[in-house]
Image (tube, rainbow, N blue to C red):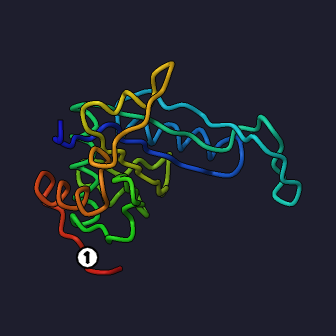
Amino acid sequence: MKQIKVSKLTLNIGVGEPGDKLNKAVKLLEAITHAKAVKTKTMKRIPTWGVRPGLQIGCKVTLRGKKAEEILIMLLKAVDNRIPASKFDDYGSFSFGIKEYIDIQEIEYIPEIGIIGFEAAVTLARPGFRVKARLKSSRLGKKHKITKQEAISFMEEKFNLNKQPGA
């Protein structure tokens, strides 16, 4: 029950406006993951940014299981298997950014898309974490939660992560 695994990998691109940029972002996520991307909508009105509720300004793809691990390995190569310890939260999850998708060795440059960066968020879990998400949710014990150090150790062992000290 203490074994840690990658629960899900979420790739996210926020472009800030609907239209051509958003369509290019959707194409990029689908080219990287071979999965259908979903457009994300705004929930708030922010007049100074020209944002109103229901406006599509980003896209995301959520991957689980073996496919998530394969894509994660590919993305970690793009950042030289280095993630600062500050990118890990207290619950074992972490996220990192890819400045340009051409940094990923397996993906070729696509001229009609141009240069776009994105964020990858990784959620780690243990068996029994579904207890939190049930209809009548229960609390997890303190010993069953994933700590920051356990998450870093898991990533170092399974994915050959080279942790940057401090940072």
| Residue found at the far top of this picture | 135
Residue 166 placement, left or right of 54: left
| Residue found at the far right of this picture | 47
Q: Quadrant of the C terminus?
A: bottom left
* Nearest to the observer: residue 147 or residue 110: 147
Residue 104 higher or lower than 10, as above or below: below
Residue 44 higher or lower than 100, as above or below: above
Residue 129 higher or lower than 10, as above or below: above
Write down the quadrant of residue 165 in the picture. Answer: bottom left
| Residue that appears at 32% across and 71% down | 84
Residue 113 placement, left or right of 131: right
Callout 1: 10 Å neighbours few (<14), some, many (20+)? Answer: few
* Residue 44 image position (x, y, % from top left): 79, 45
| Residue that appears at 25% across and 38% down | 126
* Residue 124 image position (x, y, % from top left): 31, 45
Q: Secondary structure at mark 1?
A: strand
| Residue that appears at 31% across and 37% down | 7
* Residue 129 image position (x, y, % from top left): 34, 33
Q: Quadrant of the N terminus?
A: top left
| Residue that appears at 36% across and 45% down | 123
* Nearest to the observer: residue 167 or residue 76: 167
* Residue 4 image position (x, y, % from top left): 21, 43
Q: Which residue is mark 1?
A: 164
Which residue type does callout 1 highlight?
Gln
Residue 23 placement, left or right of 11: right
* Nearest to the observer: residue 50 or residue 147: 147
